[in-house]
Amino acid sequence: MEKYIILRGEALEVHEANGAFDKCVDELKAEGLEVITARQLAEVRMFGKAKHAVSSNETWLAENFNYLPNGDILVASKGFNPLLQYPSAAKMATACHVANPFREYFLNDDVVESLLEGSNHKGRVLKLKRKDVPEKIRTDEFGKRKITAFLFGDKAEDYGRFLREYGIESVPLYVVDKAYAQKQGQAFSRALWASSLYGNSALYGDSSLFNYYGRAFGVSERSEQRRAEHDGAPVGR
């Protein structure tokens, strides 16, 4: 596992795990870490700038997209993400996507009810009517648009400004086709994948969990002892 150190007011360590989604989750857990959230990604990219590995590479995020039989979408925060809520969920979901033919990771009624209940509370789950799902989000509207405000939180506006500095005027948002979602007849989960700055920082809410080039970053604040050990260490770029 590679480590990239960013020095700021409080130093952070960024760990990189590679492979299928479940493998990445397990590797990060072994380091006492969890998959990076969209807000953390924005923060690290803003501090690390464009040449940092977190900016120049793609990653799965801790949030995810869940598709209802009517085509609507439930965007779950880390704490409500069905792919991460249970110890075996990541493995079971990845196994579905590795299967030949590909299978969706379907959600039972209890999980769907929990997601719907979460949508009644700010910051837990965002319910999006299909007609309200944008194909792209202007970076000067990150703080105003529901999806980016939900994902990036209080960093949304600053992150949008950061992306504009690198010539990214809008960020594409990819989701599962409505007709396909309706055809499944049951709610299912997909991962959320964020592309690099070179890929316009696109958001893929339709991401498979199996990818030969899969990657997930995890972030942790360094302890005082480890911070002292690394005093003066060069910034990994």
Image: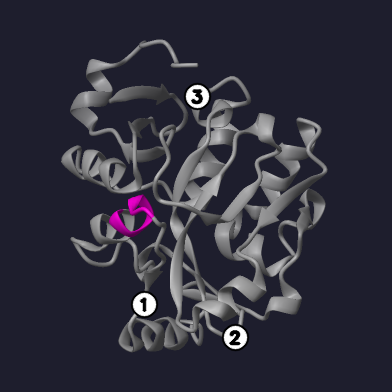
Query: Circle 1 sits on which residue?
Result: 107
Give the residue at x 60% y 64%. 176
Which residue in the structure is indicated by mark 3? 53
Q: Nearer the viewer, mark 2 or mark 3?
A: 2
Decide whether residue 98 is among the magenta residues: yes
Left or right of 115, for residue 134: right
For marks 2 and 1, the one nearer the N-term is 2
Q: Where are the magenta residues, as a range?
A: 95-100
In-front residue for pair 196/148? 196
Q: Position of residue 156 (x, y in %)?
A: 65, 54
Residue 87 placement, left or right of 9: left
How crowded pointer 2 is (Cα within 10 Å; few <14, some 14-19, many 20+) is rated as some
Question: Which amino acid is tagged 2?
Answer: Asn
Q: Are marks 2 and 1 in contact (CB under 8 Å)?
A: no
Give the SS element for disc 3.
Answer: helix
Which quarter of the picture shows residue 50?
top right
Question: Residue 38, relative to residue 4: is it above or below?
Answer: below
Residue 28 vs residue 22, the one in the foreground: 22
Q: Quadrant of the N terminus?
A: top left
Q: What residue is pinned by disc 2? A: 70
- Amino acid carrying label 3: it is Ala
Give how far across and how far down residue 209 sits, in percent: 40, 50
Residue drawn at x 34%, y 50% is: 98
Within 10 angstroms of label 3, few (less than 14), some, or many (20 or more) residues? some
Residue 35 on image: x %, y %: 36, 47
Q: Nearer the viewer, residue 43 or 191?
A: 191
- SS at badge 2: loop
Tell me if residue 162 is in the magenta stretch: no
